[in-house]
Image: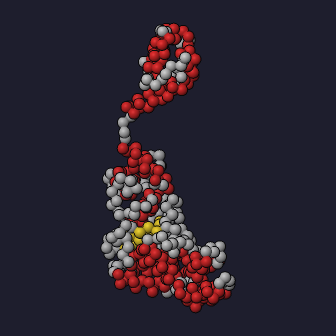
Amino acid sequence: MQIDANPHRTPGQLIAAALKEKEWTQRVLAIVLGMDETGINKLIADKRPVTAELAVALEEVLGTPAKALLDLQSEFDLAKARYAVRPDPGRTTRAHIFSGLPVAEMIRRGWLDAPDVRDVPAVEAALRTFFGTDDLDDIPVLPHAPRKTDLAANTTPAQVAWLYRAREIASEMLVARYTPSTGRRTLPRLSALLSSAEEARKVPRILAESGIRYVVVESLSSAKIDGACFWLNDESPVVAMTLRYDRIDNFWFVLRHELEHMLRGHGRETPVIVDSNLDGSQDRDEAPLEERLANAAAAEFCVPQDKLQRFIERKEPFFSERDIVGFAKTLGIHPGLVAGQLQHKTGRYERFRKHLVTIREIVRPNAVVDGWGDIAPIGL
């Protein structure tokens, strides 16, 4: 007959009840099981754990369900552990940080001064320095941390880290004084560069002369950022880009998109503007108004939209290479800008790709860059 385990809280209590039921002494049980009496005494006193093998043997001779014994042992062990192991808020903090931030990649990129991700004290000290806080709990990737940077609620930890790096680099740049008028005067100067891919090398200088801090920070692998617009203060706008899509059309679209945010003052009073998935998603109706405004300005800057629409109506569904090159020439822009807009308008991203020339190596030599093997000199 099996003994009911329900009234008992430990395996020792269940074994003692079974012995009483059978009117056995501990010595009798020791003889039956081939154990010493001291071992039986420790079992009943819950000073010796019940193993799976012993639970089966006890079930056989006492009728104590093996599963019930093991369940009681597990619950008893857990209760002892909860009593012995006190809650450690630091452990919870480390769990959030190491599960959210790409710490190993940040060390490899030179953002964190730590020898190895396994050196937890060094990593924590480096993170405090990186995020500019004395308290690890104030790091903004933690759910309970104060939002000192006014980050958008849906910004991921990797994106937060990227933004901090871009902000750190931008804060050390020397540029001309920015005013709204200098910002607006930048646009025609940039528009004059659209005819040739090589002209993009002038972008960092033109922006600096207009008081706009332009930084290129390679995206962290999990961040998936295209660009961002934020302000160090009311007179110091920053345009940061990742150039993760190394194409002429994406470069100019993202740059103009972020400049539109800047010209409208986005990110100055509202949360930092972080843009991702700008490639091929310019007209999503569900996007916030400020994103739709920036998308429209960027598309118009790359190719005047009324002229593009008329071109599509005349040539669709066949767009010859000669047509694209000729249309671009009449507009005074690179054919890659037309090709990129045609891809988006027609949804055919496999077409016109020969015109989408790479741009990253043209821009990098004249820009402040962090990534692709280069580490921006901070604090030197």
- Classify the position of the N terminus by image quarter: top right
Image spot of residue 102 (x, y percent)? 48, 55
Seen from the viewer's position, the closer of residues 373 and 64 is 64
Kindly identify the residue that appears in the image at 47 percent across and 50 percent down: 99
Q: Residue furthest bottom?
A: 330
Kindly identify the residue that appears in the image at 51 percent across and 72 percent down: 284
Work out whether 348 lies above or below 161: below
Q: How is the image coloured?
A: secondary structure
Image spot of residue 82 (x, y percent)? 39, 33
Work out whether 232 lies above or below 148: below
The quarter of the displayed image where residue 329 is located: bottom right
- Count of numbered labels shown in the rendering: 0
Image spot of residue 36 (x, y percent)? 51, 11
Kindly identify the residue that appears in the image at 53 percent across and 64 percent down: 372
Kindly identify the residue that appears in the image at 45 percent across and 16 percent down: 16
Seen from the viewer's position, the closer of residues 197 and 273 is 273
Image spot of residue 378 (x, y percent)? 40, 64
- Classify the position of the C terminus by image quarter: bottom left
Work out whether residue 246 can be spotted.
yes
The quarter of the displayed image where residue 33 is located: top right
Q: Does 173 sit left or right of 116 as displayed?
A: left
Work out whether residue 172 can be spotted.
no
